Image (spheres, rainbow, N blue to C red):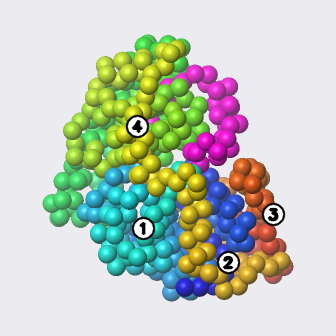
Amino acid sequence: MALPQPILYMPMEIASRELDSRLLLTTLAVARGYEVLLGQKWLIERNIDCMPPGLYLSKTLTQRDGLAMAKAKSSGYLVAAIDEELPGLFMSSSQLRWMSQEAVDATDLLFIAGAANSAAVAERFPMAANRIIQAGNPRWDLLRADLREIYADEVAALHQRYGRFILINTNLGFTNSEKGDVASIIRDQERLGKLDLKNPDHASYVQSIISMEEANRGAVEALLQELPARFPDYRIILRPHPSEALEFWQKIAGGRSQIEVVREGPAVVWIMAADLLIHTNCTTGVEALALDKPAICVMPSDSPANDRYLSNRVNPIVRNVAETLDLARQVLQPNGHEFYTDEMLSLFRQAMSYDRARLGAETILHSISERLKPISTPSARSAWQPKARYRWRIRDKNVRGLLMPQLDKSEVQDKLANFARLLNVKVPAHATEAGSKVLLVSNSQLSLGTQYRRALGRLI
């Protein structure tokens, strides 16, 4: 397989969760001679057939993704995927409901973290088994001791702003969604082919998720009543999942000054700044282990849905408010508390395909270069020359604007420079606007024709 142009396309949906890991990949890719176009997923999808073919790197493998990936394939791109849903989960082949056959069929390479999840994907999609590569997700590279320094200033700012605090992360994607009530979420997932409630297994799965979330919500509500009085020297920061509605938790917080509900910045910064993380089967519990920060998993129910999460296998589990408060007290006392067992640490490394000698991002780029050799080589003029039909702007719908805000070009450039310093590679020359919420990062200059059409596109 040969890559038509040395251009990587990386669509994103949730900037707070995806941007930094994509900038890490970008820094390494540009140092290897690639150009990278990254940003708003919906604009990139809309323009697939209006851009020079390169490698389209999808973030997930849903039915909707499959349509975009098939479009890229038919337009001459090579296609790969880094599934953002799998890290933090422990799945069997039958549980991979969001992965569509169409999306998997479109891939030339499929990057999966962990031997168990890789085997599950291969069992579900046997024809793709030879395209699966075990690789750590770049999101998790950022948590390693040699890279997390990039967040030092943001962590210091949180310390300055809040002092010492306990962080609570929730994960109520079904029962407290920004996209609507439970019935709306189910209809949406049925429309996307992720669920079929006529299937007894799917119906049972939905009920197990709902019962787990209801129990988790009740536990967090009760904790918010107890924590302020029990730990008066700490602020309580509640940070719901990016897909959750903030209003519910703001109402529960009730305007109490010691509790603040927030949604800003990447989760890793808040975990690093916190003295303790308390969560309900949230992937941030796994991130806390990777960051050497204590995390408590509150698991008040025996719902079968609990089995799919890695966090309750690598974090200590508590079943009720009393147990949570007792373990929190032990963790926060001056002499600390021995937290993670060797078994937890070993399971984490296996599940994340942790390689002490090489980043997951490096494994991904090595595999791309090895299997998908570019036909052309970099030049002084950018290979990214979109067609006249290229659309430079697109309107946000529903919660898209919140999940994918405007990219700050100078902030992106600063992060690229920091990654380059930490990785000891050359700093990418520049990031330039390639549409609303989309940037091209390259060491080559845009052609004058592209610059002219971009200027016109901003006016339309």
In the visual, does 229 lie left or right of 268?
Answer: left
Residue 293 place in picture, x, y as percent: 51, 32
Mark 4 element type:
helix
Residue 213 place in picture, x, y as percent: 30, 41
User: Does the magenta run of residues contain 114?
Assistant: no
Earlier along the polypeptide chain: callout 3 or callout 1?
A: 1
Q: Which mark is residue 342?
A: 4
In the figure, residue 448 lies in which quadrant?
bottom right
Q: Which mark is residue 61?
A: 1
Amino acid tagged 3: Ala
Earlier along the polypeptide chain: callout 2 or callout 4?
A: 2
Q: Nearer the viewer, mark 4 or mark 3?
A: 4
Structural distance between the alpha carbons of marks 1 and 2: 23 Å
Mark 1 Cα within 10 Å, few/some/many (few <14, many 20+)? many
Q: Which mark is residue 6?
A: 2
Earlier along the polypeptide chain: callout 4 or callout 1?
A: 1
Earlier along the polypeptide chain: callout 3 or callout 2?
A: 2
- Residue at 15% over, 60% down: 200
Residue 160 place in picture, x, y as percent: 68, 25
Earlier along the polypeptide chain: callout 4 or callout 3?
A: 4
Mark 1 element type:
loop
Q: Where does the magenta region start and end?
A: 142-171
In the rendered view, tell whether residue 47 sits above or below residue 297.
below
Mark 3 element type:
loop
In the rendered view, tell whether residue 5 sits above or below residue 58.
below
Q: Nearer the viewer, mark 4 or mark 1?
A: 4
Mark 2 element type:
loop
Residue 331 place in picture, x, y as percent: 45, 21
- Which residue carries the number 3 mark? 429
